[in-house]
Amino acid sequence: MTEAAAAEERPGIDPDLFVRRAQDGQARLDLVVAGMHCAGCLRKVEGALKDLSGVTYARANLSTKRVAVRWDPSALRAEAIVRKLAATGFTAVPFDPKLLGTLDEREGRALLRSLGVAGFAAANVMLVSVSVWSGLVTDMDETTRSFFHWISALIALPAIAYAGQPFFRSALKALRAGTMNMDVPIALAVILATTMSLVQTVVNARHVYFDASVTLLFFLLIGRYLDVQARAKACSAAENLLGLRATAATLLAPDGTQRSIAVENLEPGMRVLVVAGARIPADGEVTSGTSEIDTSLVTGESLPETVRSGAPVFAGTLNLGAPLVVTVTKRDDDSLLAEIVRLMESAEQGRARYVRIADRAARIYSPAVHLMALATLVLWFALGAHWEIALTHAIAVLIITCPCALGLAVPVVQVVATGRLTRQGVLVKAPDGLERLAQADTIVFDKTGTLTLGRPQLVNKDELDHADLALGVALASSSRHPLAAALAAHGGTLTRPVLKEVIEVPGMGLEGRLGDGTVRLGNADFTGAPTSSSHAGSELWLKRGDAAPTCFRFEDTPRDDAKETIVALRARGFAVELLSGDREPAVRKLAEELGIEEWRAGARPGAKIERLEELAAEGRKVAMIGDGLNDAPALRAAHVSLSPADAADVSQTAADFIFQGALLAPVVEAVDVARKSRRLVFENFGLALAYNAVAVPLAVAGFVTPLIAAIAMSSSSITVTLNSLRLNLAGVGRR
């Protein structure tokens, strides 16, 4: 079964059932287009979709054969999009996560069957050809030679008709749609070579080329099969992530009965049972039970996280301990895992500058290759060559001139890089994020939540009076402020006083009544405490009656590998700065601790943008790393930006990369992968251009047979793909 047949095996599926609505009201649909083989196919698919009225976005991914489309739902329906692609010569079906990899598997099996038939025929035709060649130098008569030629034809013609279907079907569909793809010249070359041999057989010529025709097809199929397998290794990491989700959930009915249900049918409010060893089927909240969850998929942390009643859990994470009852809070397509997949697909299917260059180069392929083959045919005729020799050279030009290597130069690197970073805890959001990160020469860090964990710790507990600590904990328990939460965590076995009428004054602190008196917990102004302090960290003050205020001192903990990361970035040639809105003592202390010489404190959002503009005016390419609400404008203004996974939503939206976990090591990994990706792209461009610069003149000059042309063409695209896969080797950045 060909890939076209595999795609068509799902007739009657309404694509409108797979349409999702974006936040801006636009409709979105992900399609699988199995017939895309080259940059020319990709360009035709995107061009056809953009010609439709109402379509605002169309991006195809050659490696994964996926197409993402967005459009105005009032202008057209999804069915019109599928019909448009069919009219262009491409069969499209809605992407279904349950069928991950099935089209690639079927295409591989179909190619393998065709390859077996071509190989069997090539071996047998070659045996007959050896007999003919031997007879040409002995006393074989014309009748015997003709008999052997017809035996070769009887073996080769059915084999070529069957084994050539992957190329013939694709070429025919393109021609019917009034377009051309890379399979058109391949099919034309195979048909011309076979027809020429058949004519030679009919006229009983001394030489026929059935052995070359079927062997040519054999090597073309080897190249296509190896290309499919290599691309499978570079398969989208987004698809691999979707493969980690549960397929079914155990639903708990109100009467206590249990039944299995597909995760796609889960709705918010439903309760599900998650046994030990099973994956959480949907984003939700633990209703009952205590267990440990492997959250590495979401947080990047290797250590399990203990969860109990009230704790949030996410789809795809693994329950390691005891059974849990979880109340679903989000549908399957709105889960955090689905959002991660959408971010990755957006990055993989985007268009960086290098991709656009490759697309423009591949665009001229179809007309150029046919004109070049025709010119070769005319040239050799003009030089007095026999029509058989001239046609053979033209066939070689048709085969050897292929844009596959150029078309794959960037997309395969992009997919491999995105997949590697995802495994290392980095999500790539921007299509050209890797390209811009590779250009960066300056790193600007925010402080709290970026270089530090954003989790302040009480550092003067031993200096505090027991009663003051208990009172402070009692007040702090009524607030979700980070400092209040840090203080409340020290409640332990303390006997807390009973407070009444506790209120929170925004930006100031907490106030409550203890007996007949008023107590306050907050900043110095709110409690009447002295404002001058040399403490580098944050402070809360407790004021009770006429007694002097008591100070609770906090310090934020730097990330465990913050200093190591700064050293690693400097070793890679980066200038490193610290730009924080925190107080000067706290910023100075952290900068000295981490060895950052250039730092600024008290920087408001506007001041951060001004500093980034200053650096840009100096010719710097700045990578901004921040997490807070106030960092979002700076993240957007920087040349490229990164944000931790626990950052504010607006900061994650503004960032080009999101890294997970409590360490900064993913930042260094992202830099290394980005730089290595750029080198591989240039290497791939060089390989593709060198191949065409050498192979095409040799074919025109008559030094390349069709068989050698087939081997060379297949080798070029496989070489580029394998070169891109080197990015998956360990130790990318170690030199």
Image (cartoon, helix red, strand yellow):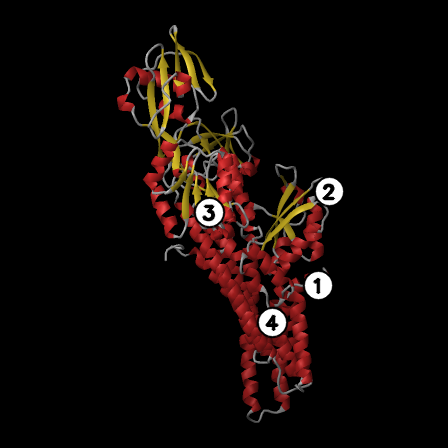
Q: Nearer the viewer, residue 65 or 576?
A: 576
Residue 62 lies left or right of residue 240; in this view the side is: right
Marker disc for residue 175: 1
Q: Amino acid at mark 4?
A: Ile
Residue at image location 67% in from the left, 76% down from the top: 375
Marker disc for residue 399: 4
- Mark 4–mark 3 Cα distance, whole angstroms, equals 38 Å
Give whichever of discs 3 and 2 has the lower sequence position.
Answer: 2
**Element type at mark 4:** helix
Residue denoted by label 3: 422
Farthest top residue? Answer: 516
Give whichever of discs 2 and 4 has the lower sequence position.
Answer: 2
Q: In the displayed structure, would residue 645 be above or below residue 350?
A: above
Q: Amino acid at mark 3?
A: Thr
Task: Give x and y (percent) for residue 595.
Answer: 34, 43
Residue denoted by label 2: 75
Q: Residues within 10 Å of mark 3 (few under 14, many from 20)?
A: many
Cβ–Cβ below 8 Å for labels 2 and 4?
no
- Mark 3–mark 2 Cα distance, whole angstroms, equals 36 Å
- Mark 1–mark 3 Cα distance, whole angstroms, equals 40 Å
Q: Nearer the viewer, mark 4 or mark 3?
A: 3
Q: In the displayed structure, would residue 401 be above or below residue 446?
A: below
Q: Residues within 10 Å of mark 1 (few under 14, many from 20)?
A: some
Q: Nearer the viewer, residue 508 or 665?
A: 508
Give whichever of discs 1 and 4 has the lower sequence position.
Answer: 1
